[in-house]
Image (tube, rainbow, N blue to C red):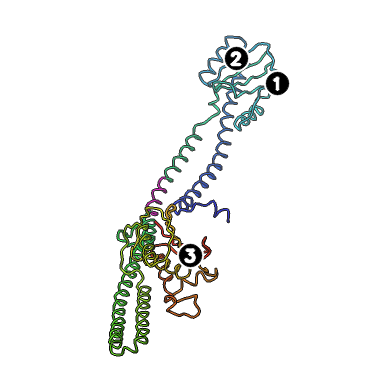
Amino acid sequence: MSLLRRIAPRDLFWRSFLIMTIPLVLVQVTVALIFFERHWDTVSRQLAMDVTGDIVTILRMTDDASGSQERAAIDRIARQEMQFRVHFEDGAVLPDDSPNRYDRAIDATLHRQLEQRLGVPYHLNTQLPDKRMTIRLQRPDGVLTLETTVKRMRESTTVLVILWMVGSALIVTAIAVMFLRNQIRPIRRLATAAEALGKGRPVTDLTPSGATEIRRAGAAFLEMQGRIQRQIAQRTEMLAGVSHDLRTPLTRVRLQLAMLAEAYPGSREEISESEQDVQLMEHMIDEYMAFARGQGGEAPVSTDLAEIIDDVAGDARRKGSPIMLEVERPLVLALRPNAIRRCLTNLVENALHHGAQVAISATRRDDVVSVTVEDDGPGIPEDQREEVFKPFFRLDSARNPRTGGAGLGLSIARDVARGHGGDIRMSGGSLGGLRAELRLPV
């Protein structure tokens, strides 16, 4: 079974083609074997009996002939009526080394008939040039040689049957190929649409077609896409309202703190700490909203990823963080620029938070673009490299917001990557710390 899985084609078209053609071929081969076995046996026996009957008739006629004129007449009759040439060698004797050859089944059948009906020594040779064969018979006064064409032992129906079987098989195969292509085409369109939706690209040109089941699948896909888009739109609108409602009281608190700082100059230090707490709350709200909103309603556009990487690295350098950059150019693919910028920013900030040295590289291999962000920090234990992508998960046991984020940076980054049909994987880096690899399909 495992061998069959390895050698079986992967495409649905070729699997369906084999399912349709293999039984057809097996049936035709079986029928051909049974038919030709009986057909050849019956036809070859009948042809051998006809040839042997002519040979016996000519033999009896020559036995009754008394002179050369009568033998010439027998030769003339045999040529006209039996397709045999007759030649008599007076005083000749058949040699001991017989040229009898029975390489083919029809030759063996003729040989059996001759043995049964002649009763005299003979030599049979069916392998002469020009498709001729001879039967030499030993007579008391010499050797009688009869020559005829091999076609007398051949029949044309076998060739016609073979041609008919091959032709019908080719016609059925052509019809099967046309039918399968028409059935596979809507499945391929549906797979392409699903792949585009998985990459976050809108699907607008899909029309359900094909068999009933495929039409149902296409209609269900379009309904699913509509529900997803409506859910995203509703969530985005709701979160925009929630964000506004949360920011309004925070703005009032910040304004009140500013007024308290002017009214009570001696409490400026305590008020400053409260202002930092408000600022932190706003930052956390931004993180929560970004995570909950996902990629919002941003549409994918053809973008050079190398330019976005340059911008992210430039922002980090302006803050005083050293960044090593090695990027292939150009790296043009369909992206949501703002979402990808946020994804890369989160990866870079995470690396800078844990390491002093960060390296960014980007390459394209076939149909995949790979962006890696490495640092020289302590890294992450292998058993926790998937845990860090969970929302609100932090490696810092103290969970002090002032020393880190809200635990949503990597969750947002992976959400963006998967929204583009890609993913993010963590591994050990060449700098001794953590290596985060963003893979995006082209």
Please say if 247 is above or below 370: below
In the picture of the structure, the residue carrying the numbered disc 1 is 97
In the picture provided, is 36 more to the left or to the right than 292? right
Choose mark 2 or mark 1, whichever is in front. 1
Magenta segment? 174-184
Question: Which residue is more in the foreground, 192 or 369?
Answer: 369
Q: What amino acid is found at the position of numbered circle 3 in the picture?
A: Asp
3 or 2: tag closer to the N-terminus: 2
Residue 63, given in percent of the width and then of the height, sits at 63, 16
Q: Is residue 272 magenta?
A: no
Question: Which residue is more in the foreground, 187 or 275?
Answer: 275
Name the residue located 35 percent from the left edge and 55 percent from the top edge: 332
In the picture provided, is 357 more to the left or to the right than 57? left
Q: Are marks 2 and 1 in contact (CB under 8 Å)?
A: no
Q: What amino acid is found at the position of numbered circle 2 in the picture?
A: His
Question: Which residue is more in the foreground, 96 or 45?
Answer: 96
Mark 1 residue crowding within 10 angstroms, few (<14) / some (14–19) / many (20+)? few
